[in-house]
Image: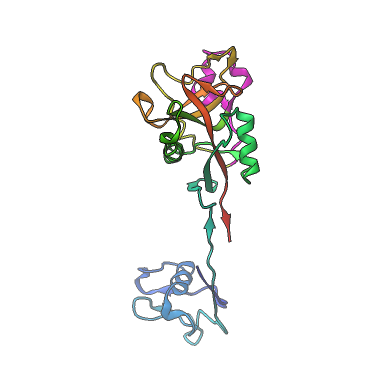
Amino acid sequence: MAVSYGVVDLTENCTLVDKIVAPNFKDCVYYCGNNETAKGDGVCPTGDLVTKLDTSTINPFTTSTIDTKTTTTTIKCPPDAGMFSRKAGWWCIEVKMSTNAIFIKSDAEALCKNNNYPVVSGLDSKQELTFVNKMAKQYLPTFTSIKSKAVWVNGERRPECYTAGRSECTGIKAFNFTDPYLSNYGGYIWQSKPIQQPDGSTENGKIQNCIVVLAAIFGEFTNSTVDDVSCSETSDVGFERKFVACGKPASYS
């Protein structure tokens, strides 16, 4: 980004012939500031831009010196993370795998924090969902157990939505989120087979209060979708909870 510094001494009487290019002084300043021929000589260029002043000897622009500074901003995520544009800014997502065993949600959160990620990431867009699914699926052929896993993502059921069937608790509205950059929820595409999710059912007697991305290389679960599961269970219908999507804002330097 190039930044030019100068001083505009006259704040009126900058008009253009036929008022075609810049109908007012503000637009005239903008034009001159972005026209290379105007930089350094203190005049608004003639030709396409023609100025008429009440006092012909007064120049609408007086710049004793113009300094140019060039700055470069680098936006970074960790090497194994994906970078995604969100409304609040750039967001990093890295899928981490439990090295010891399948794990519950609280252990997944701890794994993120131990790797310098403050939160379990949400899914702001379909692109983020696809990325998380892809990162987990690349490991599936290496497992000797059932080749279907689940990835913990951000979201926990609101207490008032523990009872299934309430109209104000349908879909994404049933959950609270702690991902600070999450705003669109476009990546929460719910699994629809064999039944529509989230169904808020129980799992070993525990309400399904958390959310996972289903990662599989067979059957109807090969598409990128999410499901509600118990926060304190490690497996359900063959989907072992082996991964977590960790998130944090990108760094700027």
Choose between 61 and 193: the one closer to the eye. 193
Q: Is residue 248 above or below residue 50?
A: above
* Residue lying at the far front of the rendered structure: 144
Whether the magenta-drawn stretch holds residue 201 is answered as no
Where does the image place residue 53, in percent across and percent down from the top left? 46, 80
Q: Colour scheme used in the picture?
A: rainbow
Where does the image place residue 81, in percent across and percent down from the top left? 51, 47
Q: Is residue 25 above or below residue 249?
A: below
Q: Is residue 79 above or below residue 39?
A: above
**Quarter of the image where one finds residue 102:** top right
Query: What residue lies at 42% left-to-right and 24% top-to-bottom?
Result: 191
Query: What residue lies at 53% left-to-right and 25% top-to-bottom?
Result: 173
Whether the magenta-drawn stretch holds residue 168 is answered as yes
Choose between 188 and 111: the one closer to the eye. 111
Magenta range is 156-180
Where does the image place residue 143, in percent across and percent down from the top left? 45, 32
Figure quadrant of the C terminus = bottom right
Where does the image place residue 249, in percent across and percent down from the top left? 58, 48
Choose between 173 and 252: the one closer to the eye. 252
Number of disc labels = 0
Query: What residue lies at 51% left-to-right and 23% top-to-bottom?
Result: 228
